Amino acid sequence: KNEVEQSPQNLTAQEGEFITINCSYSVGISALHWLQQHPGGGIVSLFMLSSGKKKHGRLIATINIQEKHSSLHITASHPRDSAVYICAGAFKAAGNKLTFGGGTRVLVKP
Amino acid sequence: GAGVSQSPRYKVAKRGQDVALRCDPISGHVSLFWYQQALGQGPEFLTYFQNEAQLDKSGLPSDRFFAERPEGSVSTLKIQRTQQEDSAVYLCASSIGQGGNSPLHFGNGTRLTVT
């Protein structure tokens, strides 16, 4: 079964703290996506990766194919980073359609 | 426009009414996905098109849900005889490649409320 699990479900941090969100998936994927959804807002694609590490500004995404695990890191967090972060896997066995994790709700306090 | 456009932004329907939700993907994007997002939940897959072909409709919750993309661009999600449990945000996403192997671009969604 194609499954994606995220942890934690909720995370509260003080401004400036380093944040890590974890994502595990069940079987082989061709790509893993990290998405951001602000309250009442649409979904924005942050990263798509199939190996290694990607960095954009204060955001870093890593993936370990062998361990079927990915992490999203936010360095020097800011209140505007408050959002729901969602990982989604494109599972090879399912024709690469995306299966979403349940999301991690992040609140960064000033 | 430059992004994925969905309309209407909000829709209120009385139970039993039919609704049609529209998605205009980015021009030239091959793949188009529909997702349903209930309040406080992550998106759930509904259906996937590659050009005009509906390759996967396994996520459609019942035969009241129907989606089409007749010319490989604009897509319509139709829900017949709406029920209260259909209340959700319906998201459309497109990508230039096939399946989930290229970056996704999401619309802002249509919030459907069935009363």
Image: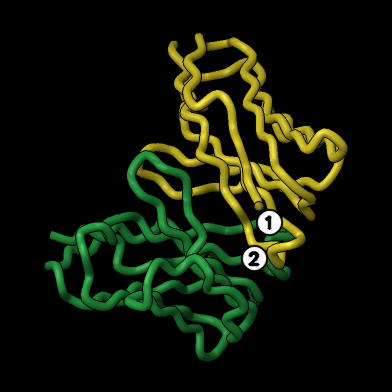
The residue located at (21%, 65%) in the rendering is: B83
Q: Relative to A30, is A86 above or below?
A: above
Q: Colour of chain A?
A: yellow
* Tag 2–tag 1 contact (CB < 8 Å): yes
List x then y, in percent, for residue A73. 68, 25
The residue located at (66%, 76%) in the rendering is: B30
Q: Chain of mark 2?
A: B
> At numbered mark 1, what does the secondary structure look like: helix, strand or loop?
loop
| Quadrant showing the C terminus of chain A | top left
Q: Which mark is residue A20?
A: none
List x then y, in percent, for residue A64. 83, 35
Residue B24 as seen in the image, left or right of residue B53: left
Query: Mark 1: which amino acid?
Result: Pro
Which residue is denoted by mark 1 in the rendering? Answer: B103
Q: Chain of mark 1?
A: B
Q: How many marks?
A: 2
- State which quadrant residue A17 falls in: top right
List x then y, in percent, for residue A102. 51, 39
Specify whether residue B1 is in view.
no
* Colouring scheme, one of rainbow, by chain, secondary structure, one colour: by chain
Mark 2 or mark 1: whose residue is earlier in sequence: 2
Q: Which mark is residue B95?
A: 2
Q: As rendered, which of B26 and A107 lies closer to the eye?
A: A107
Q: Residue furthest bottom?
A: B71
Q: Colour of chain B?
A: green
The residue located at (58%, 66%) in the rendering is: B94
The residues bearing labels 2 and 1 have C-alpha atoms spaced at a distance of 6 Å
- State which quadrant residue B89 falls in: bottom left
